[in-house]
Image (tube, grey):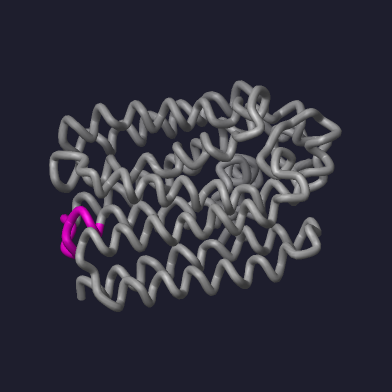
Amino acid sequence: MFAFVEQRYPALWPYIQLMRLDRPIGTLLLLWPTLWAVWIAGAGTPSLTVIVVFFLGVVIMRAAGCVINDFADRDFDGDVERTQGRPLATGALSAKQALALFCGLGLLAFGLVLFLNELTFWLSFGGLGLAVLYPFTKRFTFMPQLFLGAAFSWAIPMAFAAETGEVPEIAWLLYVANVLWTVAYDTEYAMCDREDDLKLGIKSTAILFGDADRLMIAILQGLTLLALIMVGQRLDFSWPWYVGLAGMALSFAYQHSLIRYRERWPSFHAFLNNHWAGACVFIGLYFQYF
């Protein structure tokens, strides 16, 4: 489909690239934990309105996050091997066009929130703030991945607010689990660009952890599984949930086989594999309530 758009509507193609609609991995990594929250908040039968709003919200806010990220990195992406073809780096789009697109996507997301309750409406401002802040954290902290985790996990308390009218303790435990997982997989992602980032002065957990990067990823993944086990215990879940967690653990083990030499593209494929880790947890959750 995107090849057709590139050939038939070349003027639209840079916008699609800027929003990363042709690279859905980020959308999937944001979608799976959102669905965990929606299903748990709805006790396995969430409302159709909540499902649709959060699905569309994930797509729109991930696109908006990519736009503001590339705006923040527009002076650096051209010097990084993996990102030098992005529209702002090549000049295919201007900074003003990127900001206009970001504002348009923000308005679309705001329109979706109007279908939900007041608590969810107010929580949405926190999500927007985190989405705007994250891209600029690479300038002043070695842990921008922590801010990404906070942003990528914000849909979790919003989902509980939308479905139940409150944000219970279990929502924050799920939030913590997803923050830990996000820091782990985005460290794998940052390993791809470590050499370029060091030259440019861009900070990341891959640089912070140094030779302990694989150990720290393993610890973060272990804590993710521990937090999700605690979720299952507090909700009195049975074997389907834990089978799903076992699938996530196997995915993590495979990722460590990929990053063992810290090479650029195997590390990128380890990052991509996290889609299956999130899918395993949701499949287990679905059958838990089935």
**Position of residue 114 in the picture relative to residue 182 (left or right):** left
How many marks can you see? Answer: 0
Q: Position of residue 123 (x, y in %)?
A: 28, 31
Residue 125, quarter of picture: top left
Helix, strand or loop for the magenta stretch, by majority: loop
Front residue of 221/248: it is: 221
Front residue of 189/15: it is: 189
- Does 41 appear in magenta? yes
Residue 252, quarter of picture: bottom right
Residue at 75% of width from left, 65% of height from top? Answer: 260
Is 56 placed above or below 148 here? below
- Does 211 appear in magenta? no
Residue at 21% of width from left, 40% of height from top? Answer: 167
Front residue of 147/28: it is: 147
**Position of residue 206 in the picture relative to residue 180 (left or right):** right
Is 67 placed above or below 195 here? above
Q: Quadrant of the C terminus?
A: bottom left
Residue at 40% of width from left, 45% of height from top? Answer: 176
Residue at 19% of width from left, 51% of height from top? Answer: 49
Is 131 placed above or below 172 here? above
Q: Position of residue 264 (x, y in %)?
A: 79, 56
Q: Position of residue 74 (x, y in %)?
A: 71, 29
Q: Quadrant of the N terminus?
A: bottom right
Q: Which residues are magenta?
A: 39-47
Front residue of 55/252: it is: 252
